[in-house]
Image (tube, helix red, strand yellow):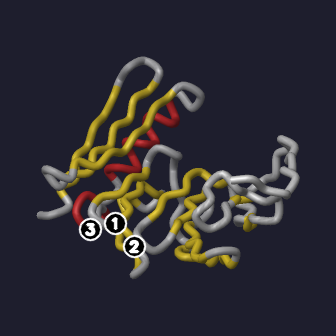
Amino acid sequence: PESDETPETVTGEEQKNQIRFSKVAQPEAVPPSFYISAPNDKLLRLIGTKDSLFALTTEAIYRINGLGESWSVAPFDLNEKLLAPELVTSAEGLIYAQTQNGLVAFDEGGLNNISRPYIGNTLQAAFDAVWDSEPDNWFAKMAADTTNKEIWLHYMDGSALSSAYMWNYET
């Protein structure tokens, strides 16, 4: 369709911790004023559930809600810190993440540490071993297997030594 509006060009200038959004039902239409400012923490990952978007940072977890042009950022859990951008996944309506406190599961209703009561600091020790050995050359990944109801964690350092853990979230 024809339009009498002149398109506006936005420069590629970096804006720290801005999350931009589009007009409703127009994913390519992102006006310069359509953004919210995320917390000043280092933003590692955005991941959504059915009703919310969560911002996982180096210092906390924040919940982003909104509709149309009205959006807000609110603290969700100020005690959990995501360890790496790839150590988060979702399965069956829940988000799973490895934080400094272990494997956590959460949704809009709240957050639960699901590993600490059973295996203590095992996951943190495995992550620390990889991080401490090769802080600039390491790999960490989390994935969900919904068929078998499992969350997989994999760590590898620069020398190809690796550790893998599987968490069954049904049993």
Amino acid residing under circle 1? Leu
Question: Could you tell which of marks 3 and 2 lies nearer the N-terminus?
Answer: 2
Q: How far apart are marks 1 and 2 (CA)?
A: 5 Å
The disc at residue 117 is: 3
Q: Mark 1 points at which residue?
A: 94
**Circles 3 and 2: CB atoms closer than 8 Å:** no
Amino acid residing under circle 3? Pro
Q: Which residue is drawn at 42% across and 67% down?
A: 49
- As rendered, which of 145 and 69 lies closer to the eye? 69
- As rendered, which of 100 and 150 lies closer to the eye? 150
Residue 14 drawn above or below residue 69: above
Q: Residue at x 54, y 25 (%)?
A: 137
Give residue 165's position: percent from left, percent from top. Answer: 25, 43
Residue 107 occupies quadrant = bottom left
Q: Which residue is drawn at 30% across and 60% down?
A: 120
- Horizontally, residue 15 falls left or right of residue 63, namely right
Give residue 82's position: percent from left, percent from top. Answer: 52, 55
- Horizontally, residue 85 falls left or right of residue 106, namely right
Residue most toward the bottom?
109
Residue 64 drawn above or below residue 48: below
Give residue 144's position: percent from left, percent from top. Answer: 28, 49
Q: Is mark 3 on a helix, strand or loop?
A: helix
The disc at residue 107 is: 2
Amino acid residing under circle 2? Asp
- As rendered, which of 151 and 6 lies closer to the eye? 6
Question: Could you tell which of marks 1 and 3 lies nearer the N-terminus?
Answer: 1
**For the residue carrying disc 2, how many other residues have a C-alpha within 10 Å: few (<14), some (14-19), or many (20+)?**
many
Residue 21 occupies quadrant = bottom right
